[in-house]
């Protein structure tokens, strides 16, 4: 990657120019290079470059200075550059509240990230600071966060699973700060999937946080996959696991009973009881619709604990989720169901899917046989007779 430099000169001259320029801005730095070499000089310059973030500093000069520092970091051998990379990231990523140069900071860290060799483990350090900064200033959309790309990078960097978990926690916090619940849920599930039976107990807090996030997400309705995660299994017997089980396969009555017995606990989770009630209504309705083609308004009102004038609005909310496809027959006071999403997908659902595929295959075979039987034997090139 080509990084714009402060001055087109050799590394010694470039350091001298940076020292002189920073001192002219008022930084406490010697204008003479250190006898200990480039790494020490870079550490001195990075420390002094903090003065460039003053409100009165020109953005063009600021970026030129830091891009010059980046160009120098990139020529330091990897085995000697870790301290320099860490120092640079800490200084650039330390954005004060209300910072107006957040995008500049992100751009500079991106320059360093893409300037480093794609297999350099130092890329992890830069990306971690990028994620934390983006979460702090709510600019998560300015950086690459695709989990597939992230897994590719992790494989190239050859970092430990503990570092990967630390990175995923930072990414989760950044998505939460940006109020991107769907993305934060995906990241947390990825995090929990990195644990094994041997260390699942270490992920207790992560598992707890994951469950609360999923339960509180208004767009998440299918939760049975959480029960298969090893850290979540470790929570069996605790109230949070009992609550999750209700949302996976229970009904509205089951939730109300749990809430009445554990009101303070649910409230301490930060979950809204009203939102929980609405979600459980939708989940209960999905379960009812699995085995029925029609449901009358009276049954919906009774099972969902609704007032008569709330039924139609509830059905509209159900349709908006796309979990159930149905139409209202106003005159008959009923709904007709065309399809529904299963809340859980276990052996029974797999068997049903298998049976459907077998039926489709048999029907296609019969159609092909019928077409073959009615197709006349034709001489090559002779058009069919009608």
Image: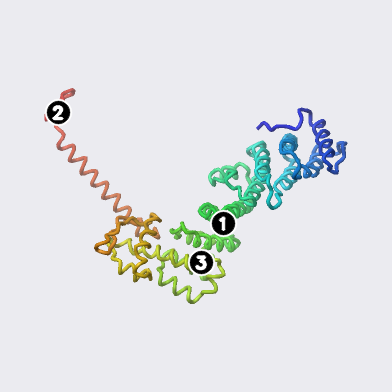
Query: For the point 30% across and 62% down, which residue is it?
Result: 291
Judge whether 278 appears above or below 145 on screen.
below
Q: In this view, does 210 lie to the left or right of 49?
A: left
Residue holding disc 3: 272
Task: Give the Cα separation between the discs numbered 1 and 3.
Answer: 30 Å
Judge whether 266 appears above or below 123 on screen.
below
Near-viewer residue (277 or 248): 277
First reached walking from the N terminus: tag 1 or tag 3: 1
Q: Residue 384 bears which disc, if any?
A: 2
Near-viewer residue (248 or 158): 248
First reached walking from the N terminus: tag 2 or tag 3: 3
Question: Dot 3: what SS?
Answer: loop
Q: Residue 327 bears which disc, if any?
A: none
Question: Dot 1: what SS?
Answer: loop
Q: Residue 195 bears which disc, if any?
A: 1
Quadrant of the rendered image containing residue 77? top right
User: Residue 34: horizontal and vertical position, in percent?
Assistant: 86, 38
Q: Quadrant of the N terminus?
A: top right
Query: For the point 29% across and 61% down, which residue is it?
Result: 335
User: Residue 192: horizontal and vertical position, in percent?
Assistant: 55, 57
The answer to whether the residues at label 2 and label 3 have Cβ atoms under 8 Å apart is no
Task: Give the Cα separation between the discs numbered 2 and 3.
Answer: 70 Å
Mark 1 vs mark 2: give the one in front.
2
């Amino acid at each position: 990657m080509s990084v714009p430099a402060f001055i087109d000169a050799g590394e010694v001259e470039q350091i001298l120019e940076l020292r002189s320029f920073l001192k002219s801005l008022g930084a406490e730095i010697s204008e003479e290079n250190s006898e200990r070499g480039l790494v020490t000089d870079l550490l001195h310059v990075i420390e002094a470059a903090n003065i460039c973030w003053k409100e009165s500093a020109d953005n063009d000069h600021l970026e030129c200075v830091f891009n010059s520092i980046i160009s120098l970091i990139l020529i330091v051998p990897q085995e000697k550059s870790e301290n320099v990379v860490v120092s640079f990231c800490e200084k650039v990523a330390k954005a004060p509240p209300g910072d107006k140069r957040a995008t500049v900071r992100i751009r500079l860290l991106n320059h360093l990230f893409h300037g480093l060799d794609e297999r350099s483990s130092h890329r992890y350090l830069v990306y971690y600071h990028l994620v934390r900064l983006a979460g702090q200033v709510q600019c998560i959309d300015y950086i690459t966060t695709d989990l597939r790309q992230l897994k590719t990078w992790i494989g190239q960097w050859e970092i430990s699973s503990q570092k990967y978990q630390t990175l995923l926690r930072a990414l989760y916090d950044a998505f939460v700060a940006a109020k991107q619940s769907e993305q934060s849920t995906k990241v947390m599930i990825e995090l929990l999937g990195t644990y094994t039976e041997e260390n699942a107990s270490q992920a207790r807090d992560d598992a707890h946080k994951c469950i609360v996030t999923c339960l509180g997400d208004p767009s998440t309705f299918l939760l049975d996959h959480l029960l298969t995660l090893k850290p979540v299994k470790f929570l069996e017997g605790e109230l949070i696991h009992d609550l999750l089980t209700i949302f996976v396969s229970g009904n509205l009555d089951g939730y109300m009973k749990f809430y009445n017995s554990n009101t303070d606990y649910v409230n301490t989770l930060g979950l809204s009881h009203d939102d929980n009630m609405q979600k459980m209504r939708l989940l209960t309705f999905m379960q009812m619709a699995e085995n029925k083609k029609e449901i009358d308004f009276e049954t919906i009102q009774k099972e969902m604990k609704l007032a008569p004038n709330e039924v139609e609005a509830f059905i509209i909310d159900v349709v908006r989720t796309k979990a159930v496809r149905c139409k209202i027959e106003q005159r008959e006071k009923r709904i007709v169901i065309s399809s529904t999403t299963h809340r859980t997908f276990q052996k029974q659902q797999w068997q049903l899917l298998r049976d459907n595929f077998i039926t489709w295959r048999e029907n296609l075979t019969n159609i092909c046989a019928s077409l073959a039987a009615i197709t006349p034997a034709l001489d090559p090139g002779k058009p069919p007779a009608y």
